[in-house]
Image: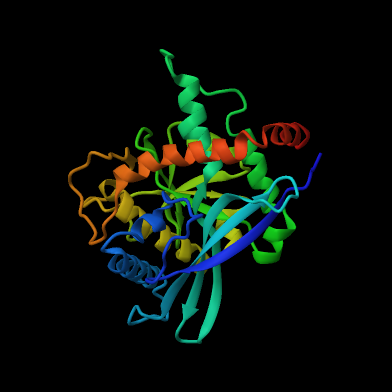
Amino acid sequence: MNNHFTFTINSICLDENYHPSDKTRITTNFANLARGSHRQANLRNALKMIDNSFNALAHWDNPKADRYTVELEIISVHMDVDGSGQTFPSIEILKTNIVDSKTNKRIEGIVGNNFSSYVRDYDFSVLLAEHNKGQAKFSIPDNFGELHGKLFQYFVNSDAYKQNFNKPPVICLSVSDNKTYHRTENQHPVLGAEYQPNESSLTEQYFQKMGLQVRYFMPPNSVAPLAFYFFGDLLNDYTHLELISTISTMGTFQKIYRPEIYNANAAAGKCYQPNLKNLDHSLTQIVYDRAERSQLANEQGKFAAEHFIKPYQTVLEQWSANHL
């Protein structure tokens, strides 16, 4: 049995000329923005929002709030399961790079940020749905997320990852609208006020199987906390500029995708429950199709079943059993 899956990493620039490739998960947030008649304006406006947010947070030695520009790379990870040269598009993440116009330096940011995975689509849209079909009470299948979690950790520990990236990934997601978050006394100069949830969520448990911890912070100029998933020590392993690159990028995307929470007209209080029905919010000038996104998650889950889970089922089960 092949115990050594191999990964190929490709990178493409996310700028106003970006066109999604045929192999990109089309529910990926930035791919959704890059289609239709407004595609170029969408991308240009989103990138401008990211730069503005970055400069507002990195305000020291930056009197005109124009010192930095964020450049984004889409990182696509393809996996060869059996050494045949046939690959499956396993993961897609974003990498930030920071251009400092004062020093003319390009500074590496953080890899991760956005997180897309066909196998996650399969777990949530196919496996979970089938498991609960006809059931009176919602439940989670045994070993839910274990294969995905092991594959992700195997990738992060792989030579391919280490040759391309200097630090572990940080993934930044929106908060859950069925939990309540309480503000703590802990305050970070860049990440802002820390919040703690009243309970664990299925997403938290799923990411825990990927080896990731989570902390919730509401950065300055934000109106709701963001969920930061990470290995190690989030507050000390990354520089302020690295953290700002993730906050500005993912905070901008959340304003576009979740305006009811992240573009609300009132900031979260000490006790906060996100509300996707909140009418007191503003819309960005960026067109985004949310209905299409949820429909496509099902299609992509089925794609993963057909092209990855079923054909490699025996190999994957044996590998997962041996890979504790």
Q: Nearer the viewer, residue 275 or 288?
A: 288
Q: How far across and down, in percent of the image, does residue 279 sit?
A: 18, 44
Residue, far bottom? 103
Above/below status of 94 relative to 106 = above
Q: Nearer the viewer, residue 55 or 74?
A: 74
Using the rendered view, name the quadrant where residue 181 is placed.
top left
**In the picture provided, is 180 more to the left or to the right than 234?**
left
Q: How far across and down, in percent of the image, does residue 106 sit?
A: 54, 79
Residue, far left? 280
Q: How far across and down, in percent of the image, does residue 272 sit?
A: 32, 40
- Determine if residue 175 is in view: yes
The C terminus, quarter of image: top right
Colouring convention used in this rendered image of the protein: rainbow
Residue at 42% over, 51% down: 26
Q: How far across and down, in percent of the image, does residue 99 sit?
A: 48, 78
Residue, far right? 1
Residue at 26% over, 57% down: 287
Q: Nearer the viewer, residue 237 or 280?
A: 280
Q: Nearer the viewer, residue 82 or 49?
A: 82
**In the picture provided, is 270 more to the left or to the right than 319?**
left
**In the picture provided, is 175 more to the left or to the right than 79?**
left
Residue at 57% over, 44% down: 213
- Determine if residue 223 is in view: no
Above/below status of 118 relative to 103 = above
How many numbered circles does the render carry?
A: 0
**In the picture provided, is 194 more to the left or to the right than 53?**
right
Residue at 67% over, 59% down: 161
The N terminus, quarter of image: top right
